[in-house]
Image (cartoon, rainbow, N blue to C red):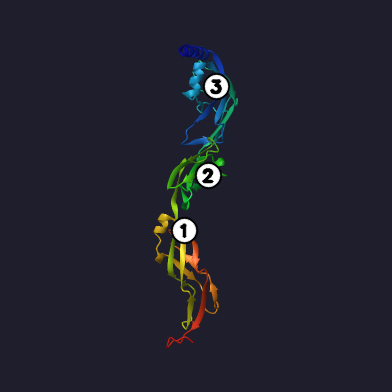
C-alpha cells in the first residue's frame, strides 16, 4: 500500500514538473565597466524583477541554483557623451537579451522596463569610518574593558567626483553581540547604500573588544599627596587622616595588574587660598588600565595649616 502511494506520488510529481509554469524571480544587475578607471555616476537598481515561463524542471533549476545575472555592457555606443560622462540606455529588449538564461526559458516581463547607466571617470577620497550602531552586551558578571576598537579608522571611497562631494564619513553596518563573556574579534561589512555608484576599500572592518569577568579589589593605607604650590616654607599642611582606603572595580585581569604604588590619591591646596576645612581627595589611576573607583574611605579629609619656626622646626 505504501509503495503504491509512493509510486503514484512520484508519477504525479514528474507529470507536474513536465508542465509549463510562470514564475517571478529576482535577477541581479551587473554593470560591465573598467572599475580601475571608471564608475557609475549614479546608482542603478540592484536587481530586475523578471517573470519567466518554462517547464517545472527548468524553473526548479533556476530557483535552486542557476543564479542568472543581467550584465549591462558599456562596449556599445552611448546615447549621450562628453569629456567626463557617458550615458548608456537599455530598453526592455536589451535587458532581456542581457540575462543569461537557457533558451528554453521565455521571459514574459521585466521590471523596471528600462535602465539608464551613466558612467564617468573615477575619483577617490579618504573619509573616517563611523559606527553608531555598535553594541556589545556581556553576560552577567562580565564587562567590556575600555572602548571597543575598530580597524581601520578610515576608508577609501571611490566613485564620481560629484557623488564624492557630500561624502564626509562612511558607515559600518550595525553590529549587536549578546551574552559575550570573552575577548571578541569579528569582521563587519561596511555599508553599500549607493549600489554600484560608490565603492569602498576595504569592504569590511574588524571589531575587537576585551571582555573580562568583573572583580573588585581594595587597597588600604594609601598616602595622600598635595599637588598645590607651597611657596611659604614656614607653613606645613596637616591632614587628618593622611591615608585612605580605595576600592576599585573592573576586569579581573586589569585589576591584577594594578598595584598600590600606581594609585595616587591627591589634593590641591594652597596656603592663603584654601583655609582650614575639609576636602575630597581625587584619585589618579594608571592611564593604561581600565578600572573604576567605587569607594573611598574616608570620603572627606580634614586639613589644617600650621606655622613652623625654621630654625627649630617647632610649630607656633
Q: Which residue carries the number 3 mark? A: 96
Mark 2 Cα-neighbour bin, 10 Å: few <14, some 14–19, many ≥20: many
Q: Residue furthest front?
A: 1
Q: CA distance from mark 2 to mark 1?
A: 36 Å
- In this view, 99 is above or below 309: above
Q: Which residue carries the number 1 mark? A: 249
- In this view, 133 is above or below 245: above
Q: CA distance from mark 2 to mark 3?
A: 35 Å
Chain-order first, disc 2 or disc 1: 2
- Residue for point 51% across, 36% down: 39
Q: Residue furthest bottom?
A: 311
- In this view, 55 is above or below 264: above
- Picture mark count: 3
Give the label, 1 or 3, closer to the camera: 1
Chain-order first, disc 1 or disc 3: 3
Residue 201 placed where, x, y %? 46, 41
Q: Which residue carries the number 2 mark? A: 170
Chain-order first, disc 2 or disc 3: 3
Amino acid at each position: 500500500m505504501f509503495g503504491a502511494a509512493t509510486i503514484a506520488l512520484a508519477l504525479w510529481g514528474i507529470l507536474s514538473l513536465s508542465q509549463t509554469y510562470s514564475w517571478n524571480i529576482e535577477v541581479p544587475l551587473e554593470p560591465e565597466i573598467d572599475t580601475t578607471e571608471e564608475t557609475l555616476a549614479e546608482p542603478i537598481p540592484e536587481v530586475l524583477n523578471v517573470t519567466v515561463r518554462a517547464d517545472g524542471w527548468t524553473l526548479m533549476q533556476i530557483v535552486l541554483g542557476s543564479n542568472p545575472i543581467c550584465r549591462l555592457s558599456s562596449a556599445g555606443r552611448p546615447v549621450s557623451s562628453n569629456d567626463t560622462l557617458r550615458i548608456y540606455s537599455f530598453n526592455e529588449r536589451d535587458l532581456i537579451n542581457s540575462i543569461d538564461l537557457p533558451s528554453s526559458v521565455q521571459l514574459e516581463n521585466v521590471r523596471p522596463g528600462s535602465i539608464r547607466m551613466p558612467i564617468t571617470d573615477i575619483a577617490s577620497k579618504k573619509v573616517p569610518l563611523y559606527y553608531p550602531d555598535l553594541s556589545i552586551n556581556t553576560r552577567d558578571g562580565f564587562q567590556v574593558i575600555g572602548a571597543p576598537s575598530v580597524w581601520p579608522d578610515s576608508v577609501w571611497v571611490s566613485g564620481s567626483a560629484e557623488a564624492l562631494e557630500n561624502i564626509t564619513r562612511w558607515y559600518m553596518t550595525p553590529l549587536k553581540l549578546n551574552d559575550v563573556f570573552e575577548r571578541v574579534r569579528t569582521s563587519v561589512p561596511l555599508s553599500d547604500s549607493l549600489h554600484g555608484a560608490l565603492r569602498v576599500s576595504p569592504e569590511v572592518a574588524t571589531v575587537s573588544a576585551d571582555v573580562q569577568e568583573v572583580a573588585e579589589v581594595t587597597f588600604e593605607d594609601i598616602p595622600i599627596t598635595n599637588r598645590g604650590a607651597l611657596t611659604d616654607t614656614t607653613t606645613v599642611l596637616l591632614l587628618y587622616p593622611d591615608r585612605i582606603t580605595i576600592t576599585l572595580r573592573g576586569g579581573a585581569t586589569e585589576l591584577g595588574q594594578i598595584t598600590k604604588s600606581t594609585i595616587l590619591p591627591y589634593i590641591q591646596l594652597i596656603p592663603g587660598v584654601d583655609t582650614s576645612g575639609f576636602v575630597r581627595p581625587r584619585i589618579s589611576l594608571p592611564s593604561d588600565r581600565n578600572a573604576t573607583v567605587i569607594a573611598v574611605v574616608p570620603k572627606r579629609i580634614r586639613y589644617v595649616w600650621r606655622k613652623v619656626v625654621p630654625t627649630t622646626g617647632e610649630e607656633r
